[in-house]
Image (spheres, rainbow, N blue to C red):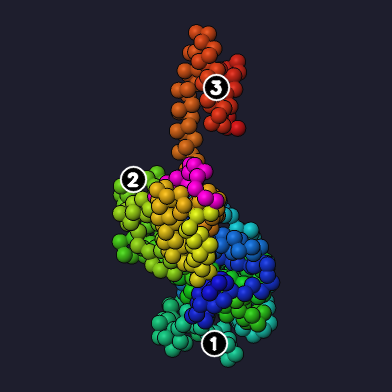
Amino acid sequence: MSTLHLYDSLTGALRRFEALNAPHVGMYVCGPTVYSDVHLGNTRTFLSFDLLFRYLKHLGYKVRYVRNITDAGHLENDADAGEDKIAKKARLEQLEPMEIVQRYTLGFHAVMQAYNALPPSIEPTATGHIVEQMELIKTLLADGYAYEANGSVYFSIETYLKTHPYGELSGRSIDDLETGTRELEGQTDKRHPLDFALWKKALPEHIMRWPSPWSVGFPGWHLECSAMSTKYLGSEFDIHGGGMDLKFPHHECELAQNKGATGHGGARYWLHANMLTLNGKRMAKSTGNTLDPRDLLAGTSEHLSKAYSPGAVRFFMHQAHYRSVLDFSDSALQAAEKGYHRLLASMQTLRKRPAHGPEQGTWNFGEWDAACTEAMNQDLNSPILIAQLFEATKAIAADQIDPQVLGTSGAKELLGRMEVWMFEVLGLAPEHQANNQQWQKALDSAMSVVLDLRQKARETKNWPASDALRDTLVEGGIVVLDGPEGSSYRLE
Ligand code: AMP
Ligand code: ZN
């Protein structure tokens, strides 16, 4: 299996990845609902798709990665009832809803950056695409897949079922879905309990509202992703992703909307990342069973014995396959950190390796690198990739005793490839880069001591000592700047 294969939820099978318009790839991932901070579970899903984004780029694809921000119309209850989550938070905190959106969007970006996730190519917001959502509703109404009732518009499952299957993505039969759905009180506008809202007429207390041909109201949650994915990627595109819990109803409804409006289901591959659990239970905002991704970096949580670097946390996550449930624990994280540091130390050994032995060694580097590729080609099997990286550390250890193992060029080549797998593909930033703030603080305090010493040497006209200090720093890439206010430094 030397080409990329991805597990597609729609067919329930591992499928060879063929881009619709290679080398271009269109990928859409459902982003966060910005009414609170993202938790470590959300972070895991976004890092799973960061891994995919990175690997597709590594394979040479030009990826247009669209990840939305859900900043409107997401009701507390999947049955289209309850209060808008953002508006509720705004009401409780006496803020404008867009202040809530801004605060948590910035927080989300900070977390993504801290964990070295690459930014998407486009990050559209639901509120910025109300017009597109209304256009989609008009198309569905014209095609007969939707109906208006008292200023709200619903998607008609009964009509849809005449020409399409419903439940194919989540593998649910209509009978199961019907028995699992109760008609909610006050939901009389719907013709069928499985119908879902495309547009909701706003109740007087609903803050986030827009004028439309049907009522002053707001769009249904599922609609935004259909509108934004097709706007930026076309009615047929390559990959749609999200967490497992979005399969139903969100993605199932998206698929139905897309088929109803364009004839295409949207994505050709539907990918779902599995959940992160804490104490065996899914991390979820609603239950409070969560960990704040920032707490891990600061070590400020009752669930932690210490602080961890973003690289160690990512390593912990990628040691599990993205489709497996991963349970969080401090001891598992400690074990991952140990392994991660072992790999970094092994790479450091390679960097410092003196040029000795033959050019090429006896170790089969080509076979090892092919095994790494093969692992990632099999539905992004990062745990097997990491196992291969540990195999390389064994060869590095053997090479220390006998330089015939890697050879001089072989060692360089191996280091280069390990850097690619570790940093480019797995996104494990080298410790000093990932932990920039901490390093900056440490460097600042060490430099203040050094600059003080140099100042004292200058005051006593001990020029050789002051010059020696400056020259040593320059060798390390630190330039000392002498000014009227005293000395400072900058990195070369
Ligand atoms: P939300 O902001 O709740 O829509 O969630 C953002 C993303 O995180 C979605 O793709 C969810 O499926 C995903 N997600 C939510 N809870 C977890 C969890 N415990 N583990 C992994 N992913 C999750
Ligand atoms: Zn979505």
Is residue 28 rendered to the left or right of residue 460?
Answer: right
The residue carrying mark 1 is: 165
Tell whether circle 3 marks a residue whose Cβ is less than 8 angstroms from ligand 1: no
The residue carrying mark 2 is: 306
Residue at 58%, 91% in the rendered image: 162
Magenta residues, start to end: 340-359
Name the residue type under label 3: Arg
Disc with the residue nearer the chain's start (1 vs 2):
1
| Residue 352 belongs to the span the image colors magenta | yes
Q: Nearer the viewer, mark 3 or mark 1?
A: 3
Q: Nearer the viewer, residue 122 or 17?
A: 17
Work out which residue is located at the far top of the displayed protein and give it: 460
Q: Position of residue 338 (x, y in %)?
A: 36, 50
Q: Is residue 37 above or below residue 486?
A: below
Residue at 49%, 13% in the rendered image: 457
Q: Which is the main secondary structure of the residues drawn in magenta?
A: helix
Disc with the residue nearer the chain's start (3 vs 1):
1
Name the residue type under label 1: Pro
Residue at 45%, 23% in the rendered image: 449
